[in-house]
Image: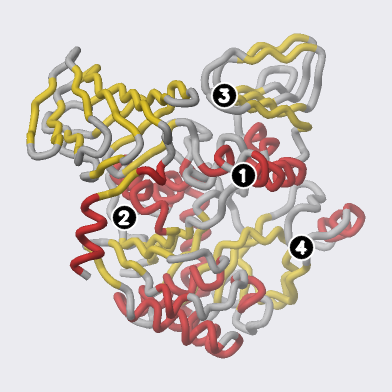
Amino acid sequence: MNIIVPLIVCGGSGTRLWPSSRASRPKQFLPLFGDFSTFQETLRRASAQGLFGRPVIVTNRDHRFLVDEQLGGIGMEADVLLEPEARDSGPAILAGARFIAERDGDSAVALSLAADHMVRDVGAFVASCRTALAVAQAGHIATFGITPDHPATGFGYIEPGDVLSHGGFLVKRFVEKPDAETAARYLREGFYWNAGNFMFQAGVLCREYETFEPATATAVAAAVVGAVRDRHVLHIDAEAFAGAGKRSIDYAVMEKTRRIAVVPATFDWSDVGSWSAVRDLTEQDETGNAARGKAVFIDARSNFVSTDGPLVAVVGLDDLAVIATDDAIMVTRREDSAGVKALVETLKASHAHLTLEHRQALRPWGSFRSLDQGARHQVKSIVVKPGERLSLQKHHHRSEHWIVVRGTATVTIGGQVKTVHENESVFIPAGAVHRLENPGKIELEVIEVQNGSYLGEDDIIRIEDVYNRAAS
């Protein structure tokens, strides 16, 4: 039976969807269109039994536990490759292809998919994959060409060439993002949008990379061979991976190889590259307004609102995007994705934390949310999953009070272990080694009040980390 291995690439920080998308939880992990993130929807789409095999995911090591959590949320398993640093899409896809070749053989067919794209017609997607499978098995690298419905200037285009007997066309050329007049001509001449998703035999891609980028091919091969496995997770060797050139898969291979073919996609597609794209995929009222969360529109047209809490009212304005999170509000022209990206670059210098973390930060053991902070105090809500625990740690310059709001906590302070129930509290003096655990079967919620001269994370000494460094 012919099996396609989904290769899901989860790179990118999604800056054009700030403030919802941030470095610690970028757009591919956000539930923008319902209960599931685009990452989860991508996995669900590429899971038809009898056609798709066990997925391989390539992501940044900072997102390991986020990936695991979202896999569990849809009841799926995968092999996860962790990049020690971002080297663009080329090395990421090549690392996945190398792993698949070692796991399943050179002739294994991989389907490289971006985790932040959206496709709703799953039946048409599967049908296009079957066509692309025949193309890939014939030794070609198949890309999916999207039939344009307007002269977009934000996408690259593909000019099709000779017809292939097993489906699709050879690619005559790739062209960069055009101006409006050129884009209109491409529409008339039958060009396709380049969706940036590919199907290929793992060995074919590896050999093409060796031809065009031999240094990167060697570095990535060594990084995958030297990877350290932790159950289903492989930590790619950092020293070897640093030798890979930072280059997109398009520039590294696809625009050079003679094996590239285009399969016309019969499915809908969006790269979800702006708030305008999110609005287009969201149900709209009769005046073109769309909202995620509580919103009111009066004498307003073609706006998009996303709010995590407060009601947003738009009165007498058109074509805006208004995005409200619990720590930031952005108002911009709906189509100005470049302006949002420039804003994020500005904020990195003045408000860097707002580009990195949400007020609610996810951790392997659960999450925490900042509730209040003053000069010498900070209040957080901490939620610990059943059976999980925080690191053993101590703080030199602050003390902490823990109040249990829900569940039961096991608290270690120095050499003592205490059980703390709902509506009870415990005090941790400065300098005391301590740990918080949840021994129960429901989530543990604790209010933490910090007092001291320094409240930053640099004050934390993680005892287990110290022990591990000493042992090594």
Q: List the residue tagged with mark 4.
A: 191
State whether residue 372 is above or below residue 34.
above
Which image quarter: residue 352? top right
Q: Nearer the viewer, residue 233 or 438?
A: 438
Q: Indicate the secondary structure of the residue bearing disc 3.
A: strand
* Quarter of the N terminus within the rendering: bottom left
Q: 10 Å neighbourhood of mark 4: few (<14), some, or many (≥20)?
A: many
Indicate which disc, 1 or 4, sits on the residue closer to the N terminus: 4
Q: CA distance from mark 3 to mark 2?
A: 33 Å
Q: CA distance from mark 1 to mark 2?
A: 27 Å
Q: Nearer the viewer, residue 22 or 313?
A: 22
Q: Residue at x 39, y 60 (%)?
A: 57
215 versus 223 height, above or below: below
Up-down relation of residue 262 to residue 407 (above or below): below
Residue 222's x, y, as percent?
A: 40, 83
Residue 49 numbered mark, or none:
2
Q: Residues within 10 Å of mark 1 (few under 14, many from 20)?
A: many
Residue at the disc numbered 3: 292
* Residue type (three-letter) at the residue carrying disc 4: Phe
